[in-house]
Image (cartoon, helix red, strand yellow):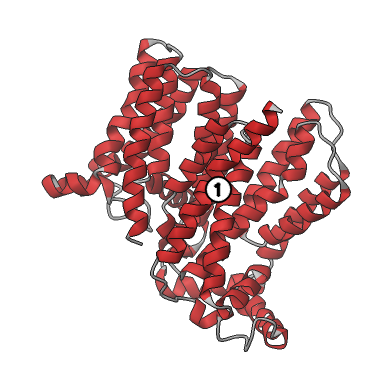
Amino acid sequence: MNKLSDRRRALLPCLALWAVLLAVHLHLAYVPGDELTFGAVMAHPLDFDALLPFLAQQYRTWSARLLIEALFCIFSTLPVWVWRLLDPVMGALAAWLLGYALHQEEKPAGMALVCFLVYLYQWHYLSDAGWVVTTVAYLWPLTMGLWALMGLLRTLRGQAVPAWQWALCSVLLVFAANMEQAALVLLALLGGGIGVLLYRRARVPAMLWVQLALTALSLVFIFTCPGNAARTAGDISSFYINYPMLTPLQKAEIGISGALAANVFGRDSVFFLFAVLVALANWTRRSPWPARVMSLVPCLLLLPLSMLRYQVKAVFPGIAFVTEAYSAAGYINLTNFGAPISYLPMLLCYGTFALCLLGVVGAFGWSGDTVLVWALLAVGGMSQAAIGFTPSAGVSSRRTGIYFSFCIIAAACVVWRAMGKKPRPARAVLAAVCAVLGAVQAVYLWQM
């Protein structure tokens, strides 16, 4: 009975998140972007005679995201209120699925933290190409991908998975893996999950191997798509003429630096709260004094360089040298590689992130929780850093970082879970930080 009551109370944060997202979607000013192009394909939402030739042309000349682009056309044709009602469900569902993956579905406080972190996500990143198209391209595959992992999650818990659930998860996986970044993340998570089962010497269900194969085949389909090659060539000639001259190391630096800069210097409340949780973990678990002091450094750096960067810039304009140093060419390029001062922004960016990683080790040692946090950040960072190996690195904007952001959310919740019992001072500090971040986010969401 208590478990049932806890499960119901754990649903309340998800319902609250859904209500907030619904209010935001009903209020936000909708200005169509790429929806104008995709909405002109079909005369009505069931006009498949027009849709199928369009998708065939897209495969030859533009993209392998055929399933996702089919939804582009359908939802760009439907009245926008359909998207306004459905998209908040996707956001709240993503939060619940993530909470389930972290064993928080019966823990109201843990689920509340998951939902609050999802609430803090920078939602305006999903408006770059138009609200409908961008959310369908990024948020929806993320949600479907989390749902597709339900079979793996239940297997890891030692629970039976009915055939209908494997079938549903596989269908959702095919849709999610049609998006390149989602396919990479799913491949890593499925492979990691299978590795854990093999390490436990547990039976690996045949459907997990099927899902792994489907994800790999989806990546093969993506990488062999002639439209992707044509799009890459067009992107190079349009806005990155120097791309063919970059070395693999330079592309890696562009991708990794872009992933880290978006979180460290991008006024990202999710990453800031992660840093705060790491610091609280070190102080509540009474880590050695050097570890405790070191854990505070990222929080202190993030205040002027990220959370208050524009206010600080108004007083000290020179701070833009650090906060705005990253470009599509990375931090270090032919124009500045010989100037030692040019490496300062890169060192601050990488160093702040590295201190957070070391802070996790300081709090929990080389435990399973530490390994999980590091693995989540590595998988999420990989999904965004991979953009550096495409010529669209300079125009993809920060919408490509949604998978990294959700991995940071998961890592923050793992830190929270591993802290165990929280003393009153830690709860007070966390409540105060969350209150400020939540209020700022409310104003930001209302202004969208």
**What residue appears at the point 43 percent right and 56 percent down from the top-left corner?**
123
**What residue appears at the point 49 percent right and 21 percent down from the top-left corner?**
361
> Would you name the residue on which mark 1 appears?
15
* For residue 223, side relative to residue 30 (left or right): right
Q: Position of residue 155 (x, y in %)?
A: 79, 36
Q: Say if residue 342 shows up in the picture.
A: yes
Q: Position of residue 357 (x, y in %)?
A: 46, 29
Image vertical order of residue 386 relative to residue 300, above or below: below
User: To which quarter of the image does residue 435 belong?
Assistant: top left
Q: Say if residue 388 shows up in the picture.
A: no
**What residue appears at the point 53 percent right and 31 percent down from the top-left corner?**
109
Image vertical order of residue 213 relative to residue 204, above or below: below
The kind of secondary structure element at disc 1 is helix
The residue nearer to you, when weighing 196 against 11, is: 11
**Which image quadrant: the C terminus?**
bottom left
* For residue 445, side relative to residue 89 (left or right): left
